[in-house]
Image: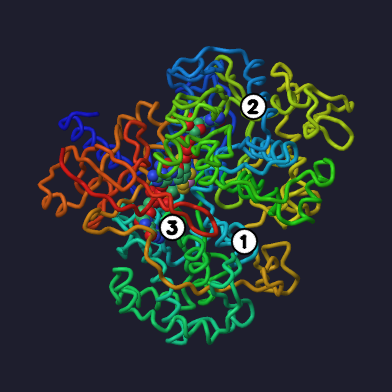
């Protein structure tokens, strides 16, 4: 823990670094490939890769010399970032070179805290033993930071191999409500719009996200337009002031869950003023409301008049009471959406997804755009941003979720299962029809004694750090320490809060130490090649999965054979001879990514999310699906459902929602009543705690805290407090306080009106700091449809220590 004086110095430094960043306070000067080349010496080799960090999906040029990454530059040929990077991208190469990289498989010695180094051969045996003992008690916990081939291999291993659907990713904590919002509205997941909308919109609304810190290069694209003299109105709707607020013309400060009231308030005004888009609605939309008798994602149909009646109470004044946003500002939003001349783009991320009404609010923001006709290119778009580099590519498209199959299919549907069984050439009936456990359920079961019904016995974690990022750690992670028969396997690159409780730790290769393919926030699929070797015995996650699969095959497990008795993951050379890719020595004899990707690609065509062959991505800086072939060329799609852009919209139609859940080419506009958050402050716990991120760190800081420039700029977590609240409690900057929720406690230093400025009665703590685990405090309440937890609203009390 920092001393008070150092804490103030450190936070001052964080502020200074930020100011040096230019217009959005977040960007460093560009290091272009020419400068970097000179810096690195003339014999460096350069190649392209997407940045390791966020879902923006910037491309970098990576300079390699003598087997090490020596420089990183923004890629000028990349449409996403046009040569720009943020501080994390600029330092991404250093993420590989922390001093304590994991380099050997480590097995816990008995029940002690000691580990012994073991061979990979033994490690693979240990995993195979655990699986053979009880395949149905085994679970895979993955990530939106898995590459597409890694996720696809894990998915096929579990659902096609073990006939076990207990596979779920950290994206459950992140994108799940966006997915259910898209499904409930359009019948198919993922945004219709893309980043080009940001170049064309007149109004940009942020619904509770902070892109100046979380999608900095994307945000700078809009700020740049303004500096060039273009008129674009930025509106920030949020529960605290952030760096994004500083760049916006309007700030609408709301209470948690205020968004639901605001969306209803806008719809109320559009109808009352007659400014909704009658033609658009009559041509392309239906109305829906929750079906309380039979709760389900698709709700029940209602008429326009029923929709109108339901909205009746949401007058600007009533919305002000519910949300805290002044009635005049609600009228301003109503007027903007009521003006057909303006092009409006909405962006959102965790504020709307980590929400116990997450599915509802996602659908409602789509609904406001549909009702007002602010849908269709370019510039009119309701766009949910993804956080992780491949939450879209791997989780949503490959479907590494407990209920899903690749290509937008689900395990509960017999036809979908049969199709996957045919593509995988596994015996009919192999895939189980019962969805597996979603993330919260999986960890709850793992942390419950076997005798009390905790039926998950082993979890294999890859590319995620649940010991720091699951909500309510005292319920969902920490109890594992006392459960001797439970077994935790963790593949990571550094020691983390999760490896602390691991029984088997596997050292992984990361980023440009392996081949990869990922998919960003705007449906863009991006590829890169391995450029350097991983340290010591670290190996690719995908190889690890294949090696375990093959060990089970050798031991005769039927699930690891296809219908013809061959290995489930057989890879053949040009002469049709199998390549033993399960041997590490042979893994790079071929490009396993390419084999897996081209196999997976078949699924992508099932729901009009067509991907091009692997080779087409090698030269491109990514392409947005659906990608279709025309005259020998692969063409991407900027705007879905829009005539003239989307190849699947029928000739002559302006808009066609061709995956409509009502099978009539229409999207659904939802009404949902406002409801309070799962936990609200009271006399005992008077403050509302919001948690989230800061510019300099990636999630749990496992990578960015090992990059000296970033960890110096933001050395440790803090509790952000409102100045008046602090004064009332007699607290000054750097004072240590004890923060308590109904679930746990945390001692942490106060930063008054720090990086962000919370309104009275609310506080904020970032979760990057492994030594200050805010998830000891957070709530594990989930949205009923998406099963995503709300990390933004936990009631806490605070006292000085
Ligand atoms: N620097 C950096 N960038 C990142 C990441 C990182 O770790 N570091 N992570 C990436 C990932 S995976 C993600 S998911 C994104 C997250 O990106 P964001 O969602 O932008 O960031 P958070 O800090 O999680 O969210 C904080 C916001 O939630 C809003 N909020 C709180 N309660 C409510 C509510 O009830 N309704 C609404 N509408 N809003 C509310 C607040 O206004 C607050 O500003 O960032 C991505 N980018
Ligand atoms: N309080 C709070 N908690 C939250 C959130 C919040 O807003 N508030 N947000 C939630 C959200 S949106 C998200 S996305 C999650 C993110 O949560 P996590 O995914 O748990 O966080 P990361 O730090 O990204 O974890 C990635 C891990 O993979 C390791 N790693 C890096 N590269 C590789 C690789 O190639 N192979 C392997 N095997 N390992 C690798 C890193 O060292 C790190 O330990 O957190 C969730 N938790
Ligand atoms: S905005 Fe995201 S993808 Fe782009 S450089 Fe920064 S962290 Fe990397
Ligand atoms: Mo996320």
Assess whether mark 2 and mark 1 are in contact (beta carbons under 8 angstroms). no
Tell me, for residue 355, which label it has, or none: 3
Judge by depth and name the residue closer to the eye, 292 or 99: 292
Residue annotated with mark 2:
130
Q: Position of residue 440 (x, y in %)?
A: 51, 46
Left or right, 485 with reference to 18: right
Q: How is the image coloured?
A: rainbow
* Residue 220 visible in the displayed image: no
Left or right, 141 with reference to 636: left
Give the mark, 2 or 3, whose residue is nearer the N terminus. 2
Residue at point 35% right, 54% down? Answer: 793
Residue at point 34% right, 79% down? Answer: 316
Judge by depth and name the residue closer to the eye, 253 or 769: 769
Q: Is mark 3 within 8 Å of ligand 1?
A: yes
Q: Assign a secondary structure to mark 3.
A: loop
Assess whether mark 3 and mark 2 are in contact (beta carbons under 8 angstroms). no
Q: Assign a secondary structure to mark 1.
A: loop
Q: Assign a secondary structure to mark 2.
A: helix
The image quadrant of residue 518 is: top right
Residue 234 drawn above or below residue 329: above
Left or right, 373 with reference to 526: left
Residue at point 69% right, 54% down? Answer: 410
The image quadrant of residue 409 is: bottom right
Residue annotated with mark 1:
639
Nearer the observer, disc 2 or disc 3? 2
Left or right, 421 with reference to 411: right
Quarter of the image for the C terminus: give it.
top left
Give the alpha-carbon distance from disc 1 to disc 2, as whole Å.
Answer: 47 Å
> How many residues crowd mark 1 within 10 Å: few (<14), some (14–19), many (20+)?
many
Q: Position of residue 734 (x, y in %)?
A: 17, 37
């Amino acid at each position: 823990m920092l001393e008070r004086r150092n804490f103030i110095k450190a936070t001052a430094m964080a502020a200074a670094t930020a100011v040096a960043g230019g217009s959005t306070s977040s960007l460093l000067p560009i290091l272009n490939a020419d400068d970097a080349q000179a810096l690195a010496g003339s014999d460096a080799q350069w190649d392209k890769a997407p940045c390791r960090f966020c879902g923006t999906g910037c491309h970098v040029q990576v300079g390699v010399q003598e087997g090490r990454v020596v420089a990183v530059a923004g890629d000028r040929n990349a449409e996403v970032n046009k040569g720009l990077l943020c501080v994390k991208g600029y330092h991404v190469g250093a993420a590989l070179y922390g001093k304590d990289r994991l380099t050997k498989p480590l097995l816990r010695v008995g029940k002690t805290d000691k580990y012994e180094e073991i061979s990979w051969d033994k490690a693979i045996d240990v995993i195979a033993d655990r699986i053979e003992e009880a395949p149905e008690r085994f679970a895979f916990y993955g990530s939106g930071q898995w590459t597409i081939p890694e996720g696809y291999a894990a998915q096929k291993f579990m659902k096609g191999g073990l006939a076990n659907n207990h596979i779920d990713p950290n994206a459950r904590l992140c994108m799940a409500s966006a997915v259910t919002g898209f499904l409930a509205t359009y019948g198919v997941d993922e945004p219709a719009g893309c980043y080009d909308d940001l170049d064309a919109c007149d109004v940009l609304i942020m619904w509770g996200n902070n892109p100046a810190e979380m999608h900095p290069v994307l945000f700078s694209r809009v700020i740049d337009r303004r500096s060039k003299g273009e008129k674009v109105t930025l509106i920030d709707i949020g529960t605290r002031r952030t760096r994004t607020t500083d760049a916006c013309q309007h700030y609408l400060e709301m209470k948690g869950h205020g968004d639901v009231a605001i969306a209803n308030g806008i719809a109320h005004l559009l109808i009352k003023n007659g400014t909704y888009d009658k033609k658009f609605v009559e041509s392309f939309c239906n109305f829906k409301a929750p079906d309380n008798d039979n709760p389900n994602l698709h709700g029940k149909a209602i008429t326009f008049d029923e929709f109108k009646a339901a909205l009746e109470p949401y007058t600007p004044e009533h919305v002000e009471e519910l949300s805290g946003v002044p009635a005049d500002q609600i009228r301003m939003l109503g007027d903007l959406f009521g003006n057909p001349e303006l092009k409006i783009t909405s962006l959102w991320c965790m504020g709307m997804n980590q929400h116990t009404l997450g599915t509802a609010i996602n659908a409602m923001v789509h609904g406001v755009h549909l009702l007002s006709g602010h849908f269709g290119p370019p510039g009119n778009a309701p766009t949910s941003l993804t956080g992780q580099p491949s939450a879209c590519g791997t989780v949503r498209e490959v479907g590494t979720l407990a209920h899903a199959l690749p290509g937008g299919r689900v395990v509960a549907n017999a036809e979908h299962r049969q199709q996957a069984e045919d593509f995988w050439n596994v015996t009919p009936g192999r895939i189980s029809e019962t969805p597996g456990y979603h993330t919260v359920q999986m960890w709850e079961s793992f942390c419950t004694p076997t005798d009390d019904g905790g039926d998950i016995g082993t979890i294999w974690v890859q590319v995620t750090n649940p010991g720091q990022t699951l909500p309510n750690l005292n319920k969902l992670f920490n109890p594992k320490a006392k459960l001797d028969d439970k077994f935790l396997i963790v593949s990571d690159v550094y020691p983390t809060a999760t490896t602390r409780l691991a029984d088997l730790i596997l050292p992984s290769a990361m980023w440009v130490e392996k081949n990869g393919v990922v998919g960003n926030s705007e449906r863009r699929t991006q590829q890169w090649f391995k450029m350097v070797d991983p340290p010591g015995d670290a190996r690719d996650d995908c190889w690890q999965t294949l090696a375990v699969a093959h060990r089970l095959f050798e031991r005769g497990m039927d699930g690891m054979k296809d219908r013809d008795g061959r290995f489930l993951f057989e890879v053949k050379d040009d002469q049709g001879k199998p390549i033993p890719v399960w041997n590490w020595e042979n893994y790079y004899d071929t490009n396993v990514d390419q084999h897996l990707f081209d196999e997976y690609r078949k699924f992508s065509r099932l729901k009009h999310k067509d991907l091009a062959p692997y080779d087409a991505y090698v030269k491109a800086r990514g392409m947005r699906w659906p990608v279709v072939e025309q005259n020998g060329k692969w063409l991407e799609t900027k705007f879905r459902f829009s005539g003239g852009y989307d190849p699947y919209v029928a000739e002559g139609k302006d808009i066609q929602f061709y995956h409509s859940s009502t099978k009539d080419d229409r999207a659904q506009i939802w009404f949902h009543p406002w409801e309070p958050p799962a936990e609200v402050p009271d006399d005992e716990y008077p403050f509302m705690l919001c948690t989230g991120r800061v510019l300099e760190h990636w999630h749990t800081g496992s990578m960015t805290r090992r990059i000296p420039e970033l960890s110096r700029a933001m050395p440790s977590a803090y509790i952000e407090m409102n100045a008046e609240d602090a004064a009332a409690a007699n607290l000054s900057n750097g004072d240590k306080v004890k923060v308590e929720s109904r679930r746990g406690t945390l001692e942490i230093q106060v930063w008054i009106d720090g990086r962000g400025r919370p309104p009275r009665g609310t506080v904020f703590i970032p979760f990057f700091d492994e030594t200050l685990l805010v998830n000891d405090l957070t709530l594990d309440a989930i949205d009923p449809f998406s099963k995503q937890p709300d990390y933004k609203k936990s009631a806490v009390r605070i006292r000085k220590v």
